[in-house]
Image (cartoon, rainbow, N blue to C red):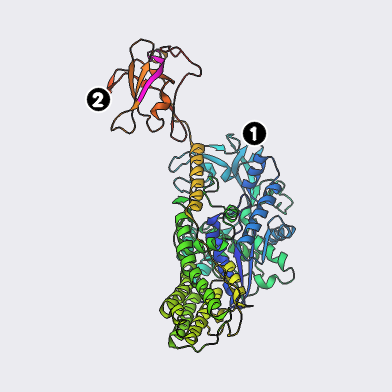
Amino acid sequence: MEKNFKRTLITTALPYANGPVHIGHLAGVYVPADIYARYLRLRGREVLMVGGSDEHGVPITIRARKEGITPQNVVDRYHAIIRDSFRELGISFDVYSRTTSPTHAETASEFFEHIDRKGGFIKKKSMQLYDEGAGRFVTDRNVVGECPVCHAQGAYGDQCEKCGSSLNALDLINPRCAETGNVPVLRETEHWYLPLDRWQADLEKWILEGHKEWKTNVYGQCKSWLDLGLQPRAVTRDLDWGIPVPAADAEGKVLYVWFDAPIGYISNTKELLPDTWERWWKDPETRVINFIGKDNIVFHCIIFPAMLMSYGDGFQLPDNVPAMEFLNLEGDKISTSRNWAVWLHEYLRDFPGKQDVLRYVLTANAPEAKDNDFTWADFQTRNNSELVAILGNFVNRVLVLTHKYFGGTVPAAEMNEADRDALAEVARLRTQLEEALETFHFREALKLAMDMARTGNRYLQETEPWKVAKTDMDRTAAILYTALQITASLAVAFEPFLPFMSERLTRILGIEKPEWDSIGSADAVPAGRTIGQPELMFEKIEDDVIQGQLDRLARIKEENKRAAWKPEPQMPDVDFDTFCKMDLRVATVTECVKVPKADKLLRFTLDDGTGTPRTIVSGIAAHYQPEELVGKQVVFIANLPPRKLRGIESQGMILSAQNADGSLTVIAPSAPATPGASVK
């Protein structure tokens, strides 16, 4: 449960402004952070939720050069897309700014200078890869080569995506610049380093002794890093895009993005609250919570805290870092470079008015303890079977019946034991819901909220007001009065998860200011109040809508397959005389049929100019219909010894090319040729 803090500062990992945000980002960081912030506000607690775009780093400069625009153009475009799509999804930031803001530049520069004045950095010279053709140092993510561990091609300078090994760019075999293709050379450079080893003991005491309550994945990853022994880490880079290093001998150097970006939490708070920001960062009675994905654990639990320790001056370390695991898409790892993702701005376009559905599904599938999978089939099922059939069904029935029997006015009623028991069950679920939210178990919390709706449906089924109304309107009034109180409880309990539905429902019920403690209350909607007209909270999603999304992913998969295609390795050399022994000729297809009981085989009858039809069996049935080949010309090897395939003597081999997508294209002359003509 929450400790006795006066206020809570919530930070969310800064999304990289090199592209839009996708469902992996949402499930891992922004939806859970928003749920927690909304919950705290409902409890009447003082809370600040801070976010912003991370707008420095090498990938931004690469995209800018590729598109022939400036890095500022790139970040301006994606910052706007990210900011606006967050707002449309209902992510309730108190401030969402950016690391190219003047406030951030000033804050990050001062942060570096303050630590530098205290002797908190060390300077070291090292050899790094340099692209002479481009005239710049090559960063780890911009150099590729053969992995020294598994020998896969295309490993990056910091990691091999095939075997997962962390790498040093200097260890790559046959490295080359990914952007230019140039072979880099070694060149000496000097940089500032944060000596993490100085803070090893302090970090061990703070984390290993002081935060054993952290999630297993977070605590375990921190312990692993600490057990290996911390090493100095560079805080500057040789780049022309970023915050210039504020030192006299730092020409051409900028702050490393991992040092620059987390300071954005502080600068964005300053931007919102220039006069009072320190009480959110330096007051011991402020609780700091960092919402991140598991790839950011080391930065937020070790490196950024070491920066804050090095700065001093009372900066508070995070009280908790409830990092999530990764979300996959249809069984495959989400990948920005492969476009294998559901992008938020595209979802909002394709599913207008269904923000809550996405929030619900991502929370229900939140990768809290292990990687999880988003599928469109599950998305449809959860919408239709849970949001529509359970939550929406209960709310709609209660509102419709109230209008039908009481003209939309909340009836006065005398509740009996069954009515009070139903509300008591909702109140009991509220206690469990609080516990789940306080401890960052958002999947369990959502289930408990939905259990309240199940309680409401069960209550209606047991009391059957539509039958009771035929004989006893007083009892009908009590049932619907109770059901309306449960409905009001749902409007509040679901506000952190489904804010758009909650807003509509509180408006219909006439609730001006939802209060958490009203969940399970017997008078949240008083008798005599006139409620609004019923509205469908959710609508079914049809099969054709889901199929459209699956078709899009299928197209992307094919595009990725083609993009990743590489020619097969060249076969060993043969001498010219051996090559000349191969007799390649042109023939016209006079007949083509499928070979019975052989899915892959076609039997060709060819006019090869000899006057005697030639039969060849070829395994291309999966790629052509027999009738489309009749009358076409093909190239074949004429002097292969005959061999029997499915009892048919095949007199040669028809040549085909295998394409990037695995399909085969029959080789044919570009213009009509005389049957039997030799291919020279």
Do tag 1 and tag 2 residues touch (Cβ < 8 Å)?
Answer: no
Residue in view at x 50 percent, y 81 percent: 480
Task: Name the residue at the top extreme.
Answer: 610
Q: In this view, does 476 lie to the left or right of 615?
A: right
Q: Looking at the figure, which quarter contains the C terminus?
A: top left
| Residue 310, numbered circle | none
Q: Residue 647 carries which label?
A: 2
Magenta region, residue range = 580-592
Q: Is residue 289 visible?
A: no
Residue 336 percent across, percent down from the top left: 55, 48
Q: Which residue is under mark 1?
A: 133
Name the amino acid, label 1.
Gly
Kindly tell me whether residue 384 is visible in this rendering.
yes
Q: What residue type is labelled 2?
A: Gly
Circle 1 — which element? loop
Above or below: residue 587 compared with residue 139: above
